[in-house]
Amino acid sequence: MEVIFSETERRAVLDEAERRQNYNLERNIKGRNGGAERGDIALMHHKLGCAGEMAVAKYLGLKNFLFTELSPKKGSCDLPFNIDVKTRRRSWHNLIVQKDDIKSKNFWLVTIEDKHINLEGWIYGHEAFKDEYINDPVGGRSAYFVPKHRLRAPELFYQHFEPLDSDSM
């Protein structure tokens, strides 16, 4: 399911990515799981992450809850309903869940390739933590790689959770 951003949404993504990068640089925060912490690669990761969060928030009508945390908090969620968004750069990539992620989260996979933003699906956290999904493709950073065919379709999310009413948004 493709999501297309308005210019305002695109600008919000870029602004938040820059803010996160600057916040991390000012505090010398290390990249997660050995990831880049400064420079163009780190900024690209922030842009991807922010774009994935915006895509899910837009689709679910949760944009009012987007980018509310100013500092990273281990174990926090990106959006209500314990949503943690994982964004990948290739449409064929699987969902990656880190071994120290929290099983009570609902993980969403967003892929962004050639400027196409796709919601691939979601899974309950406890379903992602299966030994059969453990992989270590780059060495020294094993994680759970959940195949896309194991994810629920985006449109099924509100069959499992009640939408927030417009008064709370």
Image (cartoon, rainbow, N blue to C red):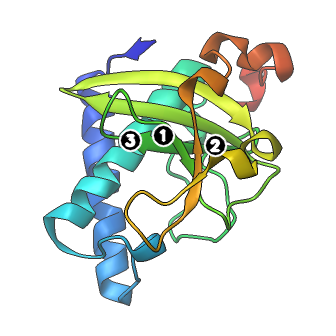
Q: Is residue 75 above or below residue 104?
A: below
Q: How many marks?
A: 3
Q: Say whether marks 3 and 2 touch (CB < 8 Å).
A: no
Q: Tell me the amino acid under the disc marked 1.
A: Glu
- Residue in the picture at 53% in, 19% down: 59
Q: Is residue 78 left or right of residue 164?
A: left
Name the kind of residue labelled 3 in the image: Arg
**3D distance between C-alphas at marks 2 and 1:** 8 Å
Instruction: Give the SS element for disc 1.
Output: helix
In front of the other: 87 or 158: 87
Residue linked to disc 1: 53
- Place residue 36 in its image quadrant: bottom left
> Is 44 placed above or below 123 here?
below
Q: At label 2, which amino acid type do we have?
A: Leu
Q: Residue at x 46, y 72 (%)?
A: 32
Q: Residues within 10 Å of mark 3 (few under 14, many from 20)?
A: many
Q: Position of residue 167 (x, y in %)?
A: 76, 24
Gap between marks 3 and 1 measured at Cα: 12 Å
Q: Position of residue 43 (x, y in %)?
A: 24, 61
Instruction: Name the residue nearer the viewer: 119 or 8.
Output: 119
| Label whose residue precedes the other's in the sequence (2 or 1) | 1
Q: What residue sits right under mark 2 in the picture?
A: 79
Nearest-to-viewer mark from 3 and 1: 3
Q: Which residue is mark 3?
A: 88
Determine the residue positioned at 57% across, 59% down. Answer: 143
Mark pair 3, 2: CA separation: 18 Å
Circle 2/circle 1 CB separation < 8 Å: yes
